[in-house]
Amino acid sequence: MPGTPYPKEQMHRIAYTKLSERQIADKLSTVARSGPTSASPLADVFAGKTIRIVTDKGPALAYTFSRTNRLSVAENGGGAVEAGYGALTLNSVAFFSHMIPGTQRGYAAVIDQDTNLATVFELWFSGYQDNREVQREIYYGYIEQPGQQPATARHVTTNRVEGKGFYWKQDTGAETLEFFPSAAYSNFVELSRLGGELGFCAPSDYIKINTDLYIYTRTECEFSGTFTAYVMDLNRVEQIGVRLGFDANDSLEYYLFRGRGEWLGQLAQFEKFGDESGAPVPAAAAGQTPAKGARRVYRPLLTMPKMTRAEVDAVCAKKTTAFAPSTGPGALMGGNRGPNTDWLAGKTLTLRYDNAPAMEYRFDDADNLNWRQEGDTNWTKARYQAWESAPGVILFGHLLEGTPNHDGHSVVADFHQGLVTCFNAYLNTPYFANEAGVRILFGVIEMDGLIPPKYNRHHVTDEMVGRAVSQNYAPGLTSMHLYTTPHSLSWIIFTDADAGGLEWSGPAAYVKIRDSLYFMYWLEEACNGTLGTILVNLHTMRDVGVGYNCGANGLNMSAVGAHERLAGQFDITRFYQAKTSGGVA
Amino acid sequence: MTKDASSTRRSFLKGGALLAAPLAAVGVPAVLIADDELKARLARLENEGAVRELHQAWLRRVYTQTRDTASLFTDPKAGPFDPSVRSIGADHAGRPDVIEVAADGKSATGRFYCVVKIENAIAQDCTLARMAHAQGGGFVRRTEHRVLNAEYVKTSGGWAIAKVEFASEQPESGIS
């Protein structure tokens, strides 16, 4: 029976082993002596040579390379240590990596042979509470040239990679889509390893070698902790790099790779013209000196409140809020939602879903409705809010108090077409009971004077996939969505300088309501459990929607609304389409 | 007694120059100024200068966000200022600063047209806001033109601030 490309658990659901320092040291001991593996032939660029790398605020590293995979290194004039290494070259750049035997440390170095400038990454395990998460410190320097003045230029952090996206295929066979919508984070889709269902995010470094060549890193924090670094040629779309870490089975991955790819597009940048600075997120708070390797890392699972079903039931019974006044929780996310509509006030209708019980409604006014499932005799009152995003298209949301899983409905009803789509939110989900789940309900509207279609329905679409859209919810509250796969999106938070900063992602879906009108949701899974739903209108460049969240403060449904800007689009939908293979053509 | 701050500064410089100049070089007009009047004027100018220096010291502490302003006040409890204010600078489009020293030289008031930079933290009640704070941001910043009113008292240790607050009225333009 043929297998599928999908993992048993997606990355954000894997309970990665908390490896001990001893376990890590044992696993490193062999590769420290043998060096990284490589599917491509190792370069002999260093074989037989001796070099000394001098860095500005870091170590001086004296290397003697005896062969293509053996070196000795002396740190800061200390005793030399023998280790295995591997090197690859890309145009003028030589890249090599090695570990230090007997330690959990190692290095990856990038040397531009044209300029003799060097960037050194010191890498180590057991530097964070999760030992398996690779730590890195970056040092900038040069290769010492006897009799010559030291080079004064340096490789520098940059935002010049921000907005780019690439497809990569490594010599290992691994295929990825990698997006750089931030100057501090990145987004990657594992096409071959995980089947490309979801995109994930990681803190990243971007360093300029020259106008063609850049260094990129990512550390898969909150996941396996694996570190990836590579040099990429933006014109030739080639890469050389290293991957170091422990996979989901705790097997050590330490290999060099070479890859070729495809440029997928360029998103807009929002920094002021002329601002090419990198590292927009300071490693430490103002006035504080960052510790070695420090960086700002978004750790949503670590900080997420995790509740049991009993706790969820208790907190929902204690406090359930729908569309609290403008100062309530999450109110800022609705800052630009615009005025709500009373279009539904006084109307009676039934939303007949294909895959769920029909919902009957009586709308008292612009804020209050009565609902019941078809067949029930009793009506339940609920507070709701509605917005008319486009003529005849009403989005409204309400909670279904009394349902076992504390359901909420975010509904888009198109009264010109007689069609309805509902994102049915619910709690008591398998991983954390306060984490929202969602079902998509398609159906039709039944009401006096309206004849709905028999077969036509709203449908899931990939038309938004690859797009990036910024959202300004309120002063100081701006983010950007990047629709990375048909089943996930990421959100990027802008810094004060409007550079892309922290980024995270979650499962998502997109439903086409009309041309340029898309109803979408995203789940902040292993994050804080929120379900976000918005109706994006690409004509008015405005979205409205509702958020659904359960936490220590109870269950809350709140308004969402933002002014949007298009930020570009990657050409990626073709990577997600099922392809016919074998059989009769 | 009301003094326009800019004209006060010019008068002070003129007076200082007179005092510093050798008598022979000053000539007859200088010696015609009554000694008592000169002393009173000098005292007033010194008080105004001291109040101005005190105001500047307060502004620096607000700007540097040390917020260690208690020692500048008669009542240390009155020291803390609106924590959302990040800096207060001169409003060059506003009216000139005014410092009035009471006739007895024991109290003074100040009125300063200023540009105020205000920063308010966004409530961390959604993912976006939490992430903004996590990266060192999460603030809404704005700049306002305001009028600052201050009251000063001369103590045995020198001048101290008795009260400082923003005026409720909108500032008028000083440019005609």
Image (tube, rainbow, N blue to C red):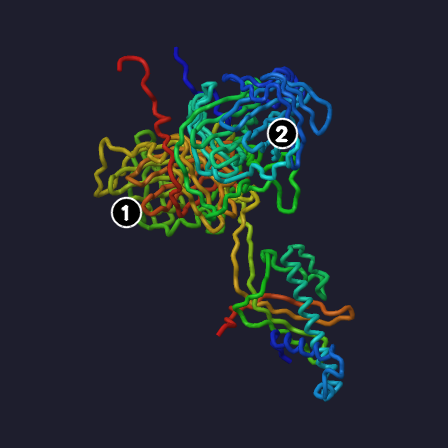
Picture coordinates of residue B164, whole percent (x, y): 63, 66
Q: Is residue A193 visible?
A: no
Tag 2: residue type?
Glu
Q: Judge from the rendering whether residue A451 lies leftward or rightward of residue A559; answer left or right.
A: left
- Taking the spot 62% from the left edge, 28% from the top edge, the residue there is A123
Density class for disc 2 (Cα within 10 Å; few <14, some 14-19, many ≥20) is: many
In this rendering, the answer to whether A152 lies above or below A485 is below
Picture coordinates of residue A284, whole percent (x, y): 62, 41
C-alpha gap between disc 1 and disc 2: 58 Å
| Residue identified by numbered label 1 | A391
- Quarter of the rendering containing residue B47: bottom right
Subunit of label 1: A
In this view, the residue in front, A389 or A186, is A186
Picture coordinates of residue A321, whole percent (x, y): 47, 44
- Taking the spot 53% from the left edge, 69% from the top edge, the residue there is B94
| Residue identified by numbered label 2 | A122
In this rendering, the answer to whether A134 lies above or below B15 is above
- Quarter of the rendering containing residue A25: top right
- The local secondary structure at tag 2 comes to strand
